[in-house]
Structure formats: structure tokens, C-alpha cells
Amino acid sequence: MKNVTRASGWGERLIEMLLLSCGLVTVLTTIGIGYILLSESLVFFKDVSLMQFFGDTQWTPLFADKHFGIWPLVMGTLLTSGVAMAVALPCGLAAAIYLRELASPTLRQWLKPSLEMLAGIPTIVYGYFALLFVTPLLQEFLPNLSGFNALSPGIVMGFMITPMIASLSEDALSAVSNDLREGAYALGAGRASTIFRVILPAARSGIAAASLLALARAVGETMIVAIAAGQQPRFTFDPQVPVETMTAYIVQVSMGDTPQGTLEYQTIFAVGLTLFAMTFIVNIFGQRLARGKRS
């Protein structure tokens, strides 16, 4: 009996060590990425001051007249991500409400996996879908829309992240106690009033966390914007014109045409560090909101 207990104890310790190792791998990977980006960016900032990087609105490091203002890339990233969230948030939240509050259990079993299939489509397929189908379709209604623009990849990116918002928001709605629903019905509230005045306010922290995590996913998207948004960094609020995002610029420079070790090549680490900081901050806020929801 003692041998069995001792073997069981060693087995549990081994499992604990394996789980701890898996957790440490993710933490160390994040630290390693941050270290590489920071160390390489310091080389870039020896030649380019922070004033040039954050104080200029032109980004032309690959041209003869070089400017290193990051804001055109940041604006391109925020513009496409903003369009994506404008599409994904209402669609995802509506889907979550329907799946949790209105759909029958049988219908839910079919609809939820079908919705989540959107997340499994390769992003390069989304990119060509935005370029070859969505953009020509939008040009029928928007004559001033360029062939490359921020609008169509933003819309398609919104469809891509809709399942994330829908799934996480449904989890947040499911966490709302049934006592609140029954109490609202007992007071004479209808289904719509119960959903919008009771359930949604109670689940707002979880919905906000889902939105922030989806935003981080949109900010870090690469292939859709690299294919359909264009490669023209410009400081603009107009989604109808070509823009360049931070991820698309990294892809452009990483194609192999720019020699390693040059200042132009080092720009990808400075841009990557900025992108890493943006997504890290958004993820931290999302995780805190999700933790607040569970507590």
C-alpha cells in the first residue's frame, strides 16, 4: 500500500513539474521576444532619436529622403483595426445574445461550431477575399474607394474576429446568474428588457474583455492588411485610401530585399517593439477585465 501511495505521489509531482514547465515556456518565450525586440531596437535608436520616431508624421526609411515617424504606420493599424471592431463588436455581441438567450439547444449546437469555423480559415484567404471580392463590391457604392484601402480589409478582418467576440461574450452571458433573469421576469420585464437592461450590464466586464482581446488580435493581423490595404504609409483618417500597417511593413522589409544590419533593416525591430507594446497593453487590460468578471 505504501509503494502504491509513494508511486502516486511521484506521479503527481511529475505532472506538476510538466505543467509548470509548460507555463514557464510561455513566460520565457514572451521574455525572449521582448529582449530581442528591445536589444535590436536600441541599435536603431542610436541613429534615430525618440523625437524623430514619435514626433514626425512621415515614414519613408526605404527612400532617399528618409523619415522615421512611426505615426503613419500606427494610424494605418488603428484605422483597419477600428473598422474591424466596428463590424465585429455588434455582429459578435448579437450572435452571443442569440446563441445564449434565444436559440434552442439543438440550434445552438449547430450554429456555434459553424460560427467558430470562420476562425479556422487561413488569413491569406481572407486577404484575397478582401482584395478581389469585397473591394470591387464596395467600389460599386463608393466610387472614390482605391483598389487598396483600409476599409475592405478592416471589414473582412471584422468577420474574422467575430467568432472570438461571440464565443467569449457568450461565456460572459452564461456566467450571469439565472436569479437575475428570473427576478427580472418576476417584476414583469419582457425578454428584450431583461437582455438589454439586466443581463448585458451584468456581463459588461466580460464583454469588454472579449472586445479588448479581439482588438489585440486585429492589431496583430498581418496577411489581410498586407494583401489588401496597400503599402503606402500615410497619416490619414480616411479608410478609402491605401495605408500601411505595422505588420505589413515588417513583412515588406523581411522579404529579403533590405540587407541585414542596415538602419533600414533595424526599423522592423523598432516597429515590432511598438506593436508588441500596443498588443501587450491591450491584452493586459483584457485579462484584468476577465479576471474581474470571474471574481
Image: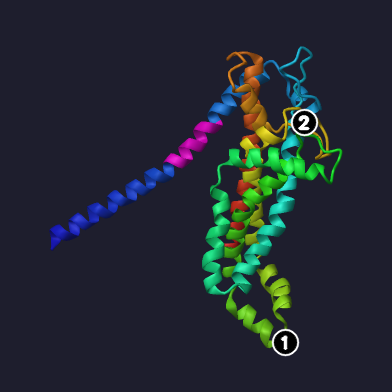
Q: Does the magenta portion include 100?
A: no
Measure the C-alpha gap from mark 1 to mark 2.
53 Å
Examine the rendered structure and indicate whether residue 217 appears above or below residue 69.
below
Q: Please indicate whether residue 228 sits to the left or right of residue 5 in the image.
A: right
Residue 126 in the image: x percent, y percent?
Answer: 63, 42
Q: Please indicate whether residue 120 sits to the left or right of residue 285 in the image.
A: left
- Label 2 crowd bin: few (<14), some (14–19), many (20+), radius 10 Å: many
- Label 1 crowd bin: few (<14), some (14–19), many (20+), radius 10 Å: few
Counting residues from the start of the chain, the first of labels 1 and 2 encountered is 2
> Which of the labelled discs sits on residue 72, or is there none?
2
- Observer able to see residue 295: no
- The residues colored magenta run 25-34
Q: Residue at x 60, y 68 (%)?
A: 99
- Observer able to see residue 62: yes
Q: Residue at x 13, y 57 (%)?
A: 3
Examine the rendered structure and indicate whether residue 100 appears above or below residue 212.
below
Q: Residue at x 37, y 49 (%)?
A: 19
Residue 89 in the image: x percent, y percent?
Answer: 70, 56
Report which quarter residue 163 is drawn in: bottom right
Marker count (numbered): 2
> Which of the labelled discs sits on residue 188, or is there none?
1
Give the quarter of the figure containing the C terminus.
bottom right
Query: SS of the residue at dot 2?
Result: helix
